[in-house]
Image (spheres, coloured by chain):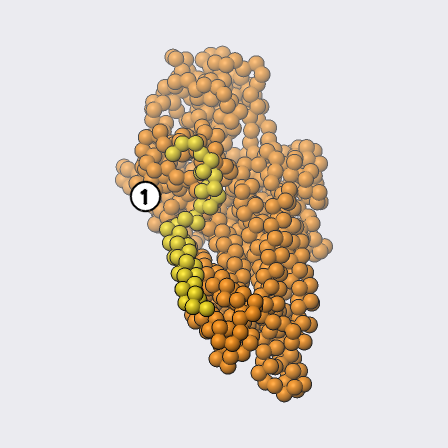
């Protein structure tokens, strides 16, 4: 059961990292043009 | 005047707007990656364009450079895209802070839900005693702060309703979340077996999804409305001594002298100072023929100047103009429309009290049955959690978000929150004629030579008259030639010299010809007539055959063109209808129990647009009409009309199906909860499954053709 002492913080930290990454994407306007971003990947240049 | 200077008259205004900051344009026609690439590459080479960026979701183009707006518009139309300049001031980049907060709350709830779920799975799969208590405690540590943060929108709405002694959907939601968390904390401290932390969190999470979708729909509608106001760049040219200054319309005072460029709209009511002017009054009267007014006559805001630039003295500004007064009338009519109760609200009104009564009954029943308060409370809370309208909260927003974005990609803006529900009930359609079903067009005579076509095109390009624009459209493919000594004769036509030969495009009488319509004369050769029929807007025939509903036309135009249209479309047409007549006809239809859809663009239609059960306006409509309409069609044609109605009906049907799914789920789950068999695992499963079913069902909106 001692493994829990490591595993629980690890799961919380990993989840927390995901949360922080998501909050960063929200703050930096990455959801302003979801359709455009989906389409841009098909462009040849730039 | 030389050929080069035909553009000079427009340039000052364009530069003025450009200097302010980046420019924005609406591009209703873009839909794919190829469009983005084509526009961004095509405009990058334009001098002064600066940074060019297309936003596909908003169908908007931003340009950071100072390139004049008219040049960008020309470049865009050469690339084959419709574009309208937007007033950046009106858009004001109202960054969507509320949506952002909701998204953050949603993310935090999702993070906490997944972690707690992980711990709950351990408990469900058999953790006991100290391990279980530890897991419950950790869950409590995660859950309580997250619920305090993420659940705020529900608590605030519930409190707002309770303060005025009313119930809304958020009251049972808040109760369920708070009681579940509170009871679970108590159970944890008492080493109890059941804790509902995961249920409290997944409730918050799923309901926040619904809330976020709902918010997106609303803010879409709001920004659509904002975009419509932004379509009209609100500047006018004020005469100050010898020079012209471009000022915002709200800065115009009475007795200011203003200049209106050819093709421009009167910004305010006033008195004509120029000798004569040719005005398009169809927005006010529906009459398709242009009217000549003389010096000293009154002109009204919204009328279009078809001739040379004219001057007027402002007599009524701001709220006093006839345009504004008409808009105020519309607002009163709109309030009546706002009283329409949306499907979701009707559901909430019956649902919320029922849930509370059921939970109370469960508590009292168990309390009197075995006298165990703790058990009775547990069952009551389980009932609240199970019945909590997770699926109900998602039922309408999930569908209408899908519908509105479907329509948006078809070039249709939905402005009003309940517009789709009202459109679904429509069973009778009333059209306006001029500007809605028809627009002026020009037929190029067969025997016209290539040289004549080139000259006609070059002449027409220098005039803002609707007929000239129609000539330009009709002569697509001809190559413009170099013209000098270009002059526009208001009410007559446009004259110039091409390679030493005088050329003229204009009214027959002015060309010394024996016909009265539009003609072209080169040198001393006899003038060539153009045919000028009232052409149908593209897509009208398809729209009418696709509608399958009784339709009629009400027009302010004279009986002759109205009759012509009636024969062509096979619809009943009523000519010379004044705004009051249109309104009276709508009221008569309403009295017959009909739900009328009004499609119109003119100022004479605004009252009818606002009074109808639902209303649609084309993008070319006057802003008062667009404001009055529920839905605005941004593309040139009307062919999307049947699609709008089909999507509206599909929205209603799918929402109702979602309500049925939620009800069926409750019918199964509530008896189990009442009997005291609802474990936290059962609650979590039932809640997730019902929410996901509702979301999947809403995704069927994509298959509506």
Q: Residue at x 52, y 16 (%)?
A: B527
Image position, residue B509 (x, y; %) = 51, 22
Q: Depth check: give the residue in front, B664 or B542.
A: B664
B425 w.r.t. B408: above or below: below
B10 w.r.t. B184: above or below: above
Q: Is residue B563 left or right of residue B290?
A: right
Q: Is residue B240 left or right of residue B295?
A: left
Report helix, strand or loop for mark 1.
loop
Colour of the chain lettered B: orange
Image position, residue B502 (x, y; %) = 42, 15
Q: Depth check: give the residue in front, A17 or B227.
A: A17
Quadrant that contains the C terminus of chain B: top right
Q: Is residue B335 left or right of residue B646?
A: left
Q: Is residue B62 left or right of residue B191?
A: left
Mark 1: few/some/many CA within 10 Å (<14, 14-19, 20+): some
Image position, residue B23 (x, y; %) = 37, 41
Residue B614 seen from this side: no
Colour of the chain lettered A: yellow
Quadrant that contains the N terminus of chain B: top left
Q: Depth check: give the residue in front, B698 or B109.
A: B109
Q: Residue at x 50, y 14 (%)?
A: B450
The residue under label 1 is B21
Image position, residue A13 (x, y; %) = 39, 61
Q: Residue at x 49, y 21 (%)?
A: B477
């Amino acid at each position: 059961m001692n493994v829990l002492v490591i595993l629980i913080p690890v799961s919380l930290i990993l989840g927390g990292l995901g949360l922080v990454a998501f909050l960063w994407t929200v703050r930096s306007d990455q959801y302003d043009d979801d359709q455009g971003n989906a389409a841009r990947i098909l462009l040849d240049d730039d | 005047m030389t050929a080069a200077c035909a553009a000079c008259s427009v340039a000052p205004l364009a530069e003025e707007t450009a200097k302010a900051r980046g420019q924005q344009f609406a591009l209703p026609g873009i839909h794919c990656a190829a469009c983005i690439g084509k526009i961004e590459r095509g405009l990058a080479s334009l001098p002064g364009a600066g940074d060019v960026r297309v936003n596909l979701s908003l169908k908007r183009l931003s340009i950071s450079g100072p390139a004049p707006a008219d040049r960008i518009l020309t470049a865009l139309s050469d690339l084959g895209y419709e574009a309208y300049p937007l007033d950046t001031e009106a858009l004001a980049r109202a960054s969507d802070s509320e949506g952002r907060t909701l998204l953050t709350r949603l993310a935090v709830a999702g993070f906490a839900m997944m972690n707690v779920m992980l711990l709950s799975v351990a408990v469900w799969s058999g953790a006991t005693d100290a391990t279980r208590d530890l897991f419950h405690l950790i869950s409590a540590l995660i859950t309580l702060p997250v619920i305090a943060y993420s659940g705020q929108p529900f608590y605030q709405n519930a409190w707002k309703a309770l303060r005025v002694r009313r119930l809304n959907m958020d009251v049972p939601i808040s109760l369920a979340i708070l009681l579940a968390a509170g009871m679970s904390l108590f159970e944890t401290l008492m080493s109890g077996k059941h804790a509902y932390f995961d249920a409290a969190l997944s409730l918050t999470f799923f309901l926040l999804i619904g809330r976020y979708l709902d918010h997106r729909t609303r803010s879409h509608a709001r920004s659509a409305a904002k975009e419509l106001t932004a379509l009209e760049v609100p500047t006018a040219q004020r005469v100050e001594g010898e020079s012209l200054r471009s000022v915002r319309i709200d800065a115009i005072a009475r007795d200011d002298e203003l200049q209106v460029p050819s093709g421009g709209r009167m910004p305010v009511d006033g008195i004509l100072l120029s000798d004569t002017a040719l005005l398009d009054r169809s927005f006010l009267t529906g009459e398709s023929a242009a009217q000549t007014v003389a010096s000293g006559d009154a002109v009204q805001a919204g009328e279009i100047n078809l001739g040379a630039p004219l001057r007027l003295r402002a007599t009524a500004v701001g709220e006093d103009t006839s345009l504004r007064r008409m808009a105020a009338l519309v607002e009163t009519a709109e309030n009546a429309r706002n009283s329409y109760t949306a499907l979701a609200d009707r559901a909430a009104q019956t649902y919320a009290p029922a849930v509370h009564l059921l939970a109370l009954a469960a508590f009292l029943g168990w309390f009197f049955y075995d006298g165990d308060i703790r058990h009775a409370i547990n069952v009551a809370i389980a009932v609240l959690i199970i019945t909590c309208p997770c699926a109900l909260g998602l039922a309408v927003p999930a569908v209408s978000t899908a519908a509105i974005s479907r329509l948006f990609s078809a070039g249709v803006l939905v402005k009003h929150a309940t517009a789709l529900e009202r459109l679904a009930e429509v069973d009778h359609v009333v059209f306006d004629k001029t500007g809605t079903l028809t627009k002026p067009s020009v037929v190029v005579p067969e025997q016209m030579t290539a040289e004549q076509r080139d000259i006609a095109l070059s002449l027409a390009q220098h005039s803002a008259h609707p007929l000239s624009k129609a000539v330009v459209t009709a002569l697509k493919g001809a190559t413009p030639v170099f013209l000098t000594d270009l002059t526009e004769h208001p009410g007559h036509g446009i004259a110039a010299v091409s390679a030493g030969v005088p050329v003229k495009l204009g009214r027959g009488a002015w060309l010394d010809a024996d016909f009265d319509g539009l003609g072209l004369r080169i040198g001393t050769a006899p003038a060539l007539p153009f045919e000028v029929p009232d052409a149908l807007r593209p897509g009208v025939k398809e729209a009418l055959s696709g509608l399958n509903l009784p339709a009629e036309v009400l027009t302010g135009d004279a009986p002759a063109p109205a009759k012509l249209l009636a024969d062509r479309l096979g619809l009943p047409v009523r000519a010379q209808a004044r705004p009051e007549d249109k309104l009276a006809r709508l009221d008569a239809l309403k009295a017959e129990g009909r739900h009328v859809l009004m499609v119109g663009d003119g100022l004479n239609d605004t009252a009818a647009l606002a009074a109808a059960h639902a209303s649609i306006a084309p993008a070319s409509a006057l802003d008062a009409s667009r404001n009055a309409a529920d839905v605005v069609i941004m593309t040139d044609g009307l062919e999307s009309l049947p699609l709008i109605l089909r999507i509206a009906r599909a929205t209603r049907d799918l929402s109702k199906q979602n309500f049925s799914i939620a009800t069926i789920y409750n019918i199964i789950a509530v008896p189990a909860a009442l009997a005291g068999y609802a474990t936290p695992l059962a609650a979590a499963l039932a809640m997730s499954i019902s929410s996901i079913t509702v979301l999947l069902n809403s995704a069927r909106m994509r298959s509506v053709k």
